[in-house]
Image (spheres, rainbow, N blue to C red):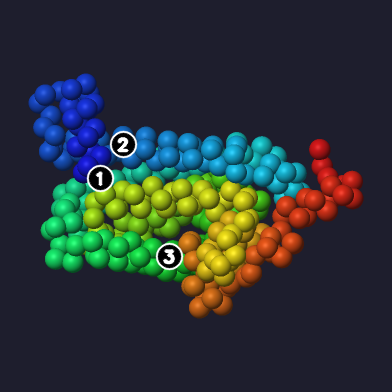
Amino acid sequence: MDYVLDAADRNLLTPYVYPASWPEGGALRQVLSLLLLTNLGAELLYLGFASLSFYYVFDHRLMKHPFFLENQVQREIKLGVTSIFWMSFPTVAFFFAEIRGYSKLYDNISDSSSGWPLVILSIGGFLFFTDMVIYWLHRILHHKSVYKYLHKQHHMFKVPTPFASHAFHPVDGFLQSLPYHVYPLLFPLHKVVYLVLFVFVNVWTISIHDGDFRIPWPLVEVINGAAHHVDHHLYFYFNYGQYFTLWDRLGGSYRHSSALLGKGPLDHVRKLSAAGKLRR
C-alpha cells in the first residue's frame, strides 16, 4: 500500500489536505490516509465492478426466481457498503504494518535472488494459501454456534446478484479477508503483485456471484465459479472454496454444479415461465 499512499501524498494529500506541520511519515497521518484510501478504493472497486457485472453479465431473469427477495439489490448494496466501511478499520492495521516494514513485501525483483521465478511462484502460492485458509474459515462460519451471528446475513441472498459479493456481516467479511493480509507477513511477495492480487480477489468475489454459470469445459471440475457458488447459497453445505474445487473435494463438500446439469436457478425460472407460474 505504500505505492498508493506515496502517490496520494504527492498528488493530493500533501498539497491540498494536510497542513505542512504534518510530516508524510507521521504515524497518525499515515493511519488517517490509509483509512481514507482504503474506504474510497474498496467502495469504488465494489460498486464499480459490481455495477458493470450486474448490467452486462448478470442474467436479470434470475430476479424472477421465487427465492429472490423483495428489494434484494438495494439490501445487498446497503449491507455491502456498510460492511466495507467497518472492515476498513482492522484492514488498515495490516496496511499500516506493511508500510512500516512488518511484512515480506519487496519493491524490486532484483532484490530477490530468485527473480521472476519467485514472482510467478508467489502468485500460485498466494492463490493456494488463501483458497485453503478461506475454505476452512468458511466451513467454521457455517458451524451452528456462530452461523446465525455472522454468516447468516450473507446467506439471506439465496439467488445472489454481483452486489451480494461484499454483503457480509463486517466481522464475517474481515475474517474471510484475513488470509490475504496474512500471506505477505509469512511469504515474500512483490508489492505490485500484491496490489494486482488485491484487485483480482475483489473482482473474483464479484464474479462468483454474477449469475453467469458458464465455465470452459476443461476447467469445470477445477474452478469454483458462479455455477458452483450459487449452489453454496442454495444448498448451504457445499462448495465452500474461493477459487478452486480442490479443498471441497478433499473435505467432502464438493457438489457438481446443478446449473451445469440443467437444474440450476435459471432452469427453474424457465420451467416456471413455461408453466405460466412466473411471478411478474
Q: How packed is label 2: few (under 14 Cα within 10 Å), some, or many (20 or more)?
A: some
**Residue type at the position of mark 1:** Met
- Compare residues 223 and 77 and report the one nearer the observer: 223
User: Is residue 102 in view from this perspective?
Assistant: no
- Which residue is disc 1 drawn over? 1
Label 1 to label 3: alpha-carbon separation: 22 Å
Residue 89 appears at what percent x and percent y?
Answer: 33, 44
Which residue is tagged 2?
A: 37
Q: Are marks 1 and 2 in contact (CB under 8 Å)?
A: yes
Q: Amino acid at mark 2?
A: Leu
Taking 49 as reference, is 178 left or right?
left
Q: Position of residue 133 (x, y in %)?
A: 40, 67
Residue 84 has which mark?
none
Reading the chain from its start, which is encountered first: label 3 or label 2? 2
- Which kind of residue does numbered mark 3 sit on? Asp
Q: CA distance from mark 1 to mark 2?
A: 10 Å
Any mark on residue 131, and which?
3
In the rendered image, the vertical position of residue 26 relative to residue 251, given as above or below = above
Above or below 51: residue 202: below
